[in-house]
């Protein structure tokens, strides 16, 4: 018999030359049987720590199986199932990862610096909603300048469509998008065109439908904390050791068996752990161990903006690489839309806010935050700029806007181009949401195919959440773009890739900016210490990159009306020491759909176009 020590992971079904070894943690039960199709049930041997295990010699990859608990009539899927071909309520399937033949032997993984992230939802990225369809479009993303894909959660969830944040089978890539090997082929193809792939994983809660963990153990969850979305997970209470191992091995599994280049950890503020070693530290270490010689990137979403997540463990951190920066998004959105209601109410979108967000990352690093009635953020001046993932839209923020509208639809074209340039030329790690690179017209709404009992409750909760935005006329029974559980709501969100041609000017905008970010020695350095800012007007500001031998760069941003700045008693506008300012790039270039503007000159009057971003470089005399 295989032993636990010889297994690659502590739980699940693992095939070998002698059959298939099954292991499950079920301390709530006295007896556990594994029922494999076409064979008699196998009584599993109880281990002292609540695990049960056995080997079934006749079992083979591809076969289906379930567990019988304490001679009950009902059969349950494996909590560590590698695939649920019939959905979360059906049987589990034995999967052998070694069947897939990888072609990415020369791939060395990714490091954080230099990355351009692209958030992708497989269910809406293509009409077919499959891994196979999505991989055909990967060369286009690489040609645009994308370097790292961030895939929204794929752990199997109930229903025919959804965002994926209500997953219940953490080791099973959802059957909706294809087989596990289809997922592997997607990652393999991405690597072949120079794209890394990280996966969004949900370690803060399980979905309410199809979650059978309590049938195996009551210790997966705890009542000692409050969780926004369900039962908090027990990472630090009695019998939490196997729970911690379950999640850490899940991180190991995705990186090891799917060659992923890292993870994005969802809503880490809802992961509660007072252990000496935080579960996020454990998860990160296991992901890096799985990668071996390859480099991986671990990113956190953390609404309170806890900077310690990205500090090393020896500095009382968790050792992650980066954290999402909502402050940049919120201030930028207010700047180009003029709306600062609900959770935008503590942002003014002023030039100084944007200067500070570009240079320092978080705007709130411990100050009082009136929307929540408490302090927000933490000291973050020691973090490197790349540690802040910046964006002007993501899945949440689009869905929280009127009609699921994207940022380019709620501001002027000029402001949108200028804001895009500001994000892509700033030293943080930029992230685009799928379709952003071609100005997609498809909305991104909240959709979830819940059962008839859950669907109205979810719709009610969603309506109440959106109700915080006074400008959005939502009610429980009136969703402008459709109820979350309606398939038509989901179908509206699918991208129309023909718009890459229709909106070729927006594609060109992103391609040129990402090339400038990649090739220019100043912007590619991601050095915030080079940046100094000055407010030039109510909606205008300057960023000067004092880059020494690489030459200075001057970025002029104006989200308001044309600005005639004279006199100009601002030292950041002064000519470079060894030359003069020369136009390098303008968001108003006609190739991006802008207007022809005369170049800025050095006559003493600075004519700074409205709704525009201009880049100047140091040209020697």
Image: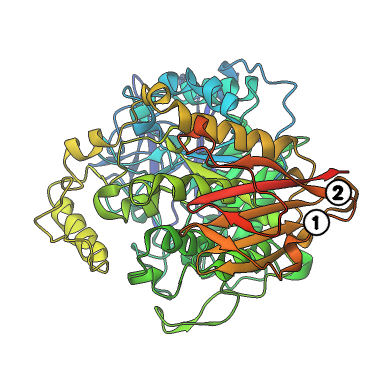
Instruction: Give the vertical position of 535 relative to 491 (above or below).
Output: below
**Contact flag, marks 1 and 2 (Cβ < 8 Å):** yes
* Viewer-proximal residue among 173 and 296: 296
User: Viewed as shown, does residue 451 lie left or right of 223?
Assistant: left
Q: Residue at x 73, y 58 (%)?
A: 544
Q: Quickly name the residue at label 2.
A: 579
Q: Residue at x 36, y 21 (%)?
A: 498
Q: Quickly name the residue at label 1.
A: 575
For the rendered model, the colour scheme is rainbow
Q: Residue 357, located in which quarter of the rendered image?
A: bottom right
Tell me residue 360's x, y (percent): 67, 66
Badge 1 crowding class, 10 Å Cα cut-off, few under 14, some 14 to 19, many 20 or more, is: some
For the residues labelled 1 and 2, the Cα–Cα distance comes to 7 Å
Tell me residue 102's x, y (percent): 63, 18
* Viewer-proximal residue among 123 and 3: 123
Tell me residue 165's x, y (percent): 38, 49
Badge 2 crowding class, 10 Å Cα cut-off, few under 14, some 14 to 19, many 20 or more, is: some
């Amino acid at each position: 018999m295989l032993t636990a020590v010889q297994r690659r992971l502590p739980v699940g079904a693992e095939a070998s030359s002698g059959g298939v070894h099954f292991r499950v943690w079920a301390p709530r039960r006295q007896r556990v049987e594994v029922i494999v199709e076409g064979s008699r049930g196998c009584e599993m041997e109880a281990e002292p720590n609540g695990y049960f295990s056995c080997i079934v010699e006749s079992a083979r990859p591809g076969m289906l199986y379930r567990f019988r608990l304490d001679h009950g009539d009902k059969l349950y899927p494996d909590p560590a199932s590698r695939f649920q071909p019939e959905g979360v309520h059906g049987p589990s399937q034995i999967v052998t990862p070694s069947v897939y033949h990888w072609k990415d032997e020369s791939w060395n993984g990714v490091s954080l610096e230099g990355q351009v992230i692209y958030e992708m939802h497989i269910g809406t990225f293509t009409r077919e909603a499959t891994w196979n369809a999505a991989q055909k479009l990967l060369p286009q993303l690489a040609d645009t300048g994308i370097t790292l894909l961030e895939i929204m959660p794929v752990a199997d969830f109930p229903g025919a469509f959804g965002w994926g944040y209500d997953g219940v089978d953490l080791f099973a890539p959802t059957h909706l998008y294809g087989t596990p090997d289809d997922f592997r082929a997607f990652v393999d193809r991405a690597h072949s065109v120079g794209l890394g792939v990280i996966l969004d994983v949900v370690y803060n809660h399980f979905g309410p439908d199809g979650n059978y963990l309590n049938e195996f153990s009551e210790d997966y969850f705890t009542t000692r904390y409050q969780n926004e979305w369900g039962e908090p997970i027990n990472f630090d209470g009695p019998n939490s050791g196997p729970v911690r191992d379950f999640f850490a091995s899940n991180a190991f599994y995705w990186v090891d068996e799917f060659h992923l280049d890292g993870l994005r950890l969802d809503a880490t503020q809802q992961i509660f752990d007072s252990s000496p070693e935080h579960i996020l530290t454990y998860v990160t270490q296991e992901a890096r161990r799985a990668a071996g010689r390859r480099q991986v990137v671990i990113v956190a979403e953390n609404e309170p903006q806890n900077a310690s997540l990205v500090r090393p463990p020896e500095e009382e951190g968790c050792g992650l690489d980066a954290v999402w920066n909502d402050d940049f998004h919120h201030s930028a959105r207010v700047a180009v839309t003029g709306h600062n209601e609900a959770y935008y109410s503590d942002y003014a979108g002023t030039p100084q806010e944007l200067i500070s967000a570009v240079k320092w990352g978080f705007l709130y690093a411990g100050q009082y935050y009136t929307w929540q009635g408490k302090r927000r953020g933490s000291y973050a001046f020691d973090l490197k700029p790349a540690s802040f993932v910046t964006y002007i839209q993501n899945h949440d923020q689009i869905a929280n806007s009127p009609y699921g509208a994207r940022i380019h639809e709620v501001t002027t074209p000029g402001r949108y181009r200028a804001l895009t340039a500001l994000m892509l030329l700033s030293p943080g790690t930029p992230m685009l949401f799928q379709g952003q690179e071609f100005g997609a017209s498809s909305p991104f709404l909240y959709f979830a195919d819940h059962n008839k009992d859950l669907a109205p409750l979810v719709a009610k909760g969603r309506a109440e959440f959106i109700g915080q935005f006074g400008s959005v006329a939502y009610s429980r029974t009136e969703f402008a773009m459709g109820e979350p559980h309606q398939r038509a709501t989901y179908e509206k969100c699918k991208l129309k890739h023909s718009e890459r041609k229709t909106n070729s000017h927006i594609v060109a905008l992103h391609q040129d900016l990402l090339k400038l970010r990649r090739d220019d020695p100043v912007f590619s350095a991601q050095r915030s210490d080079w940046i100094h800012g000055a407010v030039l007007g109510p909606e205008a500001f300057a960023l000067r990159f004092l880059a020494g031998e690489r030459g200075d760069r001057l970025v002029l941003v104006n989200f308001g009306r044309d600005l005639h700045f004279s006199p100009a008693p601002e030292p950041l506008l002064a000519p470079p020491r060894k030359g003069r300012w020369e136009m390098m790039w303008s968001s108003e270039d006609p190739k991006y759909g802008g207007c022809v503007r005369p170049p800025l000159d050095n006559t003493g009057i600075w004519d700074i176009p409205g709704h525009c971003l201009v880049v100047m470089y140091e040209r020697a005399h």
